[in-house]
Structure formats: C-alpha cells, structure tokens
Amino acid sequence: MSYIKRTNTKEILKYLGFYSVTAILGPGQCGKSTLAKRIIDSFPKTFYIDLELPSDLAKLQDTEAFFTLKSDSLICLDEIQRLPEIFPLIRSIVDRTDKPGRFLLLGSVLVN
C-alpha cells in the first residue's frame, strides 16, 4: 500500500512552526497517524506516543517529568482522547514556555 499525499501537510507544518500545540482530528482510520509520522520525520527531535499501547502509556507515569525531559522535542500524542486528564498539564506547560512545535495531538471521536 502506498502513501496518499495530503494537501494539508504544508499547512500543518506551518502551524507547528507558529503554535505550541497543533491538533489533527478526524474519524478513525482516516490516516491521521500516518500523516503525523510523515510530518514528524522532518523534525530533528521527536517522540511519538501511542496512548493505546501500554508500553507508551508507561512512559507517561510521571507525565510532567517526561514533558520536562523532552522539552527540546516535538511530542506527538496519538489517540489523545484516551487521556483527557492530560490537557490541563499541556495547557500549563504551554502557558509557561510558549514554544512553537511543542505538541502534535492526534485524536478522533468515538461515536456509538
């Protein structure tokens, strides 16, 4: 299977260069993670965390410490809707540092 180029890639890169937090939202299985992985390849330091994987969740046992240690990196949090309690911490960090390209959040809404 080949990668389908997205027309919004340049726009997302522009947002990452200007805003501390950028989000890619959409329905499940529409290509958010694939797009994000392509985008973060262009950054020198990145961490991709899939919040559905127990091993990745374990990295966030002390989320504030993790974010502090990785303060020079773009942190991509996939399936962000799985950890809504993280939003106040992200807001607090962004309020203190206001550094562009700090977080790339990926999420979808689960509809029953």
Image (cartoon, rainbow, N blue to C red):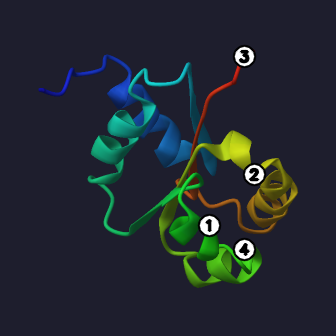
Label 1 crowd (10 A; few <14 / some 14-19 / many >=20): some
Q: Earlier in the sequence, mark 2 or mark 4?
A: 4
Q: Which residue is mark 1?
A: 57
Q: Amino acid at mark 2?
A: Leu
Q: Are marks 2 and 3 in contact (CB under 8 Å)?
A: no
Q: Earlier in the sequence, mark 4 or mark 1?
A: 1
On the picture, is 11 further left or further right than 106? left
Q: Are marks 1 and 2 in contact (CB under 8 Å)?
A: yes
Q: Amino acid at mark 4?
A: Thr
Q: CA distance from mark 2 to mark 4?
A: 11 Å
Q: Which residue is mark 4?
A: 63
Q: Which residue is mark 3?
A: 111
Q: Give the SS element for disc 3.
A: loop
Q: CA distance from mark 1 to mark 2?
A: 10 Å
Quadrant, the N terminus: top left
Q: Earlier in the sequence, mark 2 or mark 3?
A: 2
On the picture, is 28 further left or further right than 44? right
Q: Are marks 2 and 4 in contact (CB under 8 Å)?
A: no
| Residue 32 screen position, x and y as percent | 44, 31
Viewer-nearest of discs 2 and 3? 3
Quadrant, the C terminus: top right
Q: Amino acid at mark 3?
A: Val
Quadrant of res 11 = top left
Residue positioned 66% across, 73% down in the render: 60
Query: Is 80 in front, or is 67?
Result: 80
Residue positioned 38% across, 27% down in the render: 31
Residue 83 shows which numbered tag? 2
Viewer-nearest of discs 2 and 4? 2
Q: How many marks?
A: 4
Q: Give the SS element for disc 1.
A: helix
Q: Is residue 18 above or below residue 55?
A: above
Q: Give the SS element for disc 2.
A: loop
